[in-house]
Image: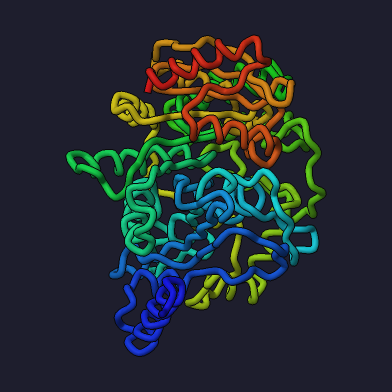
Amino acid sequence: MISQTMKGHLILLNILLLFLLFPLCIPSFLQDQERDIIVELPGQPSHVDFDQYSGYVSVNQQAGRALFYWLVEVPKSSGPESKPLVLWLNGGPGCSSIAFGAAEEIGPFHIQPDGKTLYPNPYAWNNLANLLFLESPAGVGFSYSNTTSDLYTAGDLRTAEDAYVFLVNWFERFPQYKHRDFYIAGESYAGHYVPQLSYILYERNKGIQNSSINFRGFLVGNAVTDDYHDYVGTFEYWWTHGLISDSTYVTLQALCDFESSEHPSKECEDVLDVADVELGDIDPYSIFTPTCNKSAAESHRLRGYYPWMYRAYDPCTERYSKVYFNIPEVQKALHANVTGISYPWETCSDIVGDYWADSPRSMLPIYRELIAAGLRIWVFSGDTDAVVPLTATRHSIDALNLPTVVKWYPWYDDGKVGGWSQVYKGLTLVTVRGAGHEVPLHRPRQALVLFESFLEGKAMPSKNKETRLWETHTSAQLHASE
């Protein structure tokens, strides 16, 4: 008599034999996943308990555009199949989500100073959700286009459309994520990418029951949001933090057209140069922390979307990324650079950023529509960032004229104030005390607390047990506001 266990083994063996004899019977998506699985990264720590995949997804066959992704799943011991999926985008425009989001912020590994070995990030966000990092648009990082002009004509519209096509095709490759709760997160100029992509998903999901892309909401940090209010808030931050003189503050207000940051006047650029000198040799992305020692060649400032905005935060960790992701063995393990791109992998693309095309002045109309649709929307801000500062974010949110559900209050982590929060009808604002432009880089533990609260749809934690009833009440109000 054959036991049930033995029968099960025989059935499995027969299935495996069929796949070996008739490989074409294997579903194509399984073949694609098998091709994309990362066996092991060079310098990776031992005892890694989660799966990783990376590779390319075509978004425009005629132009030859393909975007590079890196999926990091939740540890197997925590049940990745029951956890949501979160797409992470960095901004610039022109900066890599692999370089910043994955390698120095929320990914499972950070890079050692030798540029060759990795160490575990104890506050990695894949402890709570499956993370999908995307290098976007084509021309950024490992993402490419066979049409050279694409690198000189990228803009908001095409970036959003390509990202949407990427998602549609990616979900076909990974159908196990269909219908799973799906969120989008990002920072900086992703303050444009995230709501624009969110809007496309919302519009194209209309009227579809049980959509395969179960989009639930978004989370953005130190986000470029509205030209006018970002200008007002940034100059205000510089002045109130003693970074510029009274006279320069007055002149900035007089000469800079707050309605248009993309093409500032010559007079505005001149006074911005004065402000730049007055700021001195500080890290504007984190004004109270030391700068990384730079050579003269590295210290030049690359202005990004805003005239005062350096394209990428440049602590020493960025140097480590430039070394690691240009190692041929690393690229092979990631299934990257399969076309043999002629230029080295860079953390940010100067061509894409310098030639950026369309860029709407405000994301607030999209916020209004998505708030009305009931999506979960959280905005967070590190309060030591002078590039897209908290004051800019607060001015933009104030312009929405949302009713307050929970008044401004301090939130706590490990008995200490982690920042402050205010809940509006349809939107939650969270500040992170002592964090710069890249909140998870400077305050990784507090950023993980923030991420957990966002996923659970709960108010940021309050001080002690005596206030837990109040916290529960605010969480209920929070759900009611969504």
Q: Position of residue 139 (x, y in %)?
A: 47, 62
In the rendered image of this protein, does residue 45 appear above or below residue 35?
Answer: above
Q: In percent of the image, x 70 and y 23: which residue is there?
A: 244
Q: In percent of the image, x 46 and y 20: which residue is there?
A: 397
Q: Nearer the viewer, residue 417 or 273?
A: 417
Q: Quadrant of the C terminus?
A: top left
In the picture as drawn, the residue positioned furthest to the left comes out as 207
Q: Nearer the viewer, residue 379 or 285?
A: 379
Q: Nearer the viewer, residue 23 or 345?
A: 23
What is the image's colouring?
rainbow
Q: Is residue 392 left or right of residue 286?
A: left
> Is residue 436 visible to us here?
yes
Q: Position of residue 463 (x, y in %)?
A: 67, 16
Quarter holding residue 33 = bottom left
Q: Is residue 178 left or right of residue 353?
A: left
Q: Quadrant of the N terminus?
A: bottom left
